């Protein structure tokens, strides 16, 4: 399943039915045989129903109906396919609209949020963690290329080096001079080895150029490379501005795609955290350089988002921005910000999507690095 693209997310933002929207995020662990995922979902449904107990009578009835509809969708003791499910359900007593998406990548948690429009933060988080990347296995005579996106590894290319021309080792004429014969054989081997190495270099250069072209056309965020140092050096030198992350110093080209996919999923959290740290360092360096190409903190960043100046928004994925004090004058039309209103992170995501800015929720050390700025920074276009 492919998560919605930018235009689809914008349409979700524009969907504001009269009774509001219940946004549901379900995380499923295939190894969980005790039904923990279902218990978490039931808890989430009880929570949103309880939260509307003081609402008008029709709203309470509609929410109870919708909560039961969600539970009926996920059969007890029978986990659905996929590790993540995100749904947006119109809160109405009957014939309410439903939009569901499933993913092989799990969301951070099972949760349910009731609001005037779809709650997109979990979807943004999954999309960021599972963005499209290239995966390449390099050896001296073979290069295998895959594309990984949202938990799925797809074959792209498999190229083998062929020996071109007269690559046979020349045989010297018989001679009674043994030393001379041995010298001729050694020279023949040297010549063969030199031609083989030259051909290998041309091969790796050619394939690297193909990979770089593919990366540009497909919009890969990263390129993970597996291979021995000697061959990898030649390959990466020919990639141009595309930077490969050389993560294993051995050839994995003979492994099954399923094994490669497992290794990619094992590596992704660490690689994503490294990428996020670099982004934070880039923003801070820009902020303190005097070029005014960065914003620090929720207030400054929201103002830049309102002006369409943000190129890349970064925020702490673990932080709850509800109730965060934001000054007036943000030219925002909608429910109030803060507790009982639209969360600040949702407003930032809304404006980022509307203006074409990239969004990266941060975790771990990168998120901690934003504590001094209340968990929000951005790289600006101007």
Image (cartoon, rainbow, N blue to C red):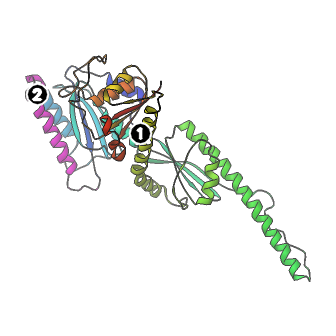
What percent of the width, then of the height, locates residue 342? 24, 26
Task: Name the main secondary structure of what is drawn in magenta.
Answer: helix
Mark before the other along the chain sequence, 1 or 2: 2
What percent of the width, then of the height, locates residue 36? 20, 51
- State the quadrant of the N terminus: top left
Quickly name the residue at label 1. 280
Residue at horizontal 16 percent and vertical 38 percent from the top: 45
The residue mark sitting in front, 1 or 2, is 1
Disc number placed over residue 61 in the picture, else none: 2
Vertically, is 340 above or below 29? Answer: above
Residue at horizontal 45 percent and vertical 36 percent from the top: 285
- Residues shaded magenta: 31-59
At mark 1, the secondary structure is helix
CA neighbours of label 1 inside 10 A, class few (<14), some (14 to 19), many (20+): many
Residue at horizontal 49 percent and vertical 58 percent from the top: 256
Q: Nearer the viewer, residue 222 or 26?
A: 222
Measured Cα–Cα span from mark 1 to mark 2? 46 Å
Residue at horizontal 31 percent and vertical 37 percent from the top: 372
What percent of the width, then of the height, locates residue 380? 44, 28
Judge whether residue 264 can be spotted in this image.
Answer: yes
What percent of the width, then of the height, locates residue 87? 28, 35
């Amino acid at each position: 399943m492919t998560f919605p693209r930018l235009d689809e997310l914008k349409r979700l933002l524009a969907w504001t039915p009269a009774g509001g929207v219940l946004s549901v995020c379900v995380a499923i662990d295939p190894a969980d045989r005790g039904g923990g995922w279902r218990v978490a979902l039931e808890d989430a449904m009880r929570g949103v129903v309880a939260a509307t107990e003081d609402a008008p009578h029709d709203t309470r009835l509609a929410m109870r109906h919708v909560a039961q509809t969600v539970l009926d969708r996920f059969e007890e003791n029978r986990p659905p396919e996929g590790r993540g499910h995100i749904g947006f359900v119109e809160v109405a007593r009957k014939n309410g609209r439903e939009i569901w998406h499933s993913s092989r990548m799990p969301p951070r948690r099972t949760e349910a949020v009731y609001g005037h429009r779809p709650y997109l933060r979990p979807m943004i988080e999954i999309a960021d963690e599972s963005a499209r990347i290239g995966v390449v296995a390099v050896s001296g005579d073979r290069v295998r290329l895959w594309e990984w996106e949202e938990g799925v590894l797809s074959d792209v290319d498999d190229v083998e080096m062929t020996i071109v021309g007269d690559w046979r080792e020349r045989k010297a004429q018989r001679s009674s001079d043994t030393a001379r014969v041995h010298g001729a054989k050694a020279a023949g081997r040297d010549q063969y080895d030199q031609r083989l190495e030259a051909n290998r270099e041309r091969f790796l250069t050619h394939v690297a150029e193909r990979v770089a072209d593919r990366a540009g056309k497909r919009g890969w965020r990263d390129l993970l490379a597996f291979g021995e140092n000697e061959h990898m050096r030649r390959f990466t030198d020919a990639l141009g501005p595309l930077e490969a992350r050389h993560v294993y110093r051995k050839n994995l080209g003979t492994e099954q795609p399923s094994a490669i996919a497992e290794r990619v999923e094992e590596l992704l959290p660490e690689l994503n955290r490294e990428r996020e740290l670099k982004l934070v360092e880039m923003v801070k360096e820009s902020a303190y350089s005097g070029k005014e190409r960065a914003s620090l903190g929720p207030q400054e960043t929201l103002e830049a988002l309102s002006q369409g100046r943000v190129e890349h928004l970064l925020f702490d994925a673990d932080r709850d921005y509800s109730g965060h004090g934001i000054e007036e004058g943000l030219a925002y039309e909608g429910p109030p910000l803060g507790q009982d209103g639209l969360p600040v992170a949702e407003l930032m995501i809304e404006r980022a999507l509307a203006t074409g800015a990239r969004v990266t929720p941060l975790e771990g050390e990168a998120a901690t690095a934003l504590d001094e700025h209340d968990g929000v920074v951005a790289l600006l276009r101007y």
